[in-house]
Image (tube, rainbow, N blue to C red):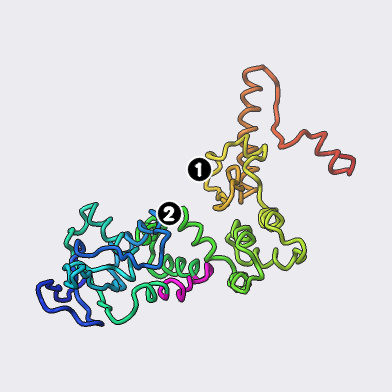
Amino acid sequence: MSLQTQTPTNPGRAPVQSGDVHEIALNKLKASPRNARRVGHTADDVEARAASIRVKGLLQPLVVEPEVKEGGQESGYYLVTIGEGRRQALKLLAKRKLIGKAELVRCVVDTRNDPAEISLDENVSRRDMHPADQFEAFKDLADRKGYGAEEIGARFGVSPQIVRQRLRLGSVAPALLDLYREDALTLEQMMAFAVNPDPERQMQVFAQLPQNNRQAYAIRRAMTDTKVSADDRRVQFVGLEAYAEAGGPVLRDLFTEDRGGWIEDVVLLDQLVLEKLAAIAVNVRDTEGWKWSAAYLDSPALMAARGSGNG
């Protein structure tokens, strides 16, 4: 996998000039002792960078300085002032034999600035994008490029489940995403709204719930109040798998334990319940010798009592 196409640096030549861009062999790059970051990159961070580099190449060059021996001569190695996480990701790809150990890496040589200062600058002045922007950007990849959760996860080094969560959050009503950007809503509240991917319903619930009662649990309950929980006795009787095989949609909460989710097609569920009860009624009539049998969702007496207002 070729990362760049610049002319490789030859350590035998005269010392490079500050600001020069060179391709330097990966095995000639070392961690800088003057890097301001003391807490190392996590394995997940390195994995994510490696996935990105493998798919898209090295998007940003490393900033390096020549390693100088005690006598003042250059050793032929370079110390990575900015981009240590990328160096580790490249080494991970080399370890997995996806690139060579001497893969050429595009680097900017900086001998003018203080390494510790520019390393600090790189980490202090950078600000991560807002999570809402990230959610919408992931959704854009899915909509515009047709990427699924597995493909996006492979390109960014994250699990498909995390991608699914971000895609669901990116589909929340734009007005609610804007409120999240303004800190008027929390991430927990956003996840509660996202349990139901219907933006219109999300806005209805937002308008209906008073401001002092917009806790996540209240939002989640309101977002699913027209659904039937998977632990409902009708679902337990028919079986969630049978309902799904009949074409019934199941709403799943990607952020919390939902005990199997919620049934969205209540009419289909009741139809399946009645069909199964009818089959049982016929079997009882035939095997036990009854003259007739009938199937009801509830006992006729109980339904009559409810209809009269006495139940």
Report the span colored magenta: 121-133
Q: Is residue 106 left or right of residue 238?
A: left
Sequence-first tag of 1 and 2: 2
Q: How many marks?
A: 2
Q: Residue at x 64, y 48 (%)?
A: 267
Residue kind at label 1, given as amino acid type: Glu
In what element is the residue under mark 1? helix
Task: Identify the amino acid type marked 2.
Answer: Pro
Tell which of 215 and 66 is nearer to you. 66
**Badge 1 local density, few (<14 within 10 Å), some, or many (20+)?**
few
7 or 64: nearer the viewer: 64
Q: Quadrant of the C terminus?
A: top right
Q: Residues within 10 Å of mark 2 (few under 14, many from 20)?
A: some
Q: Which mark is residue 260?
A: none
In the image, residue 206 lies at what x, y percent? Answer: 70, 66
**What is the number of the mark on residue 245?**
1
Residue depicted at 36% across the width and 67% down the height: 35
Q: Residue 160 has which mark?
A: 2
Tell me the SS state at disc 2: helix
**Label 2 near label 1: C-beta < 8 Å?**
no
Furthest residue toward left: 12
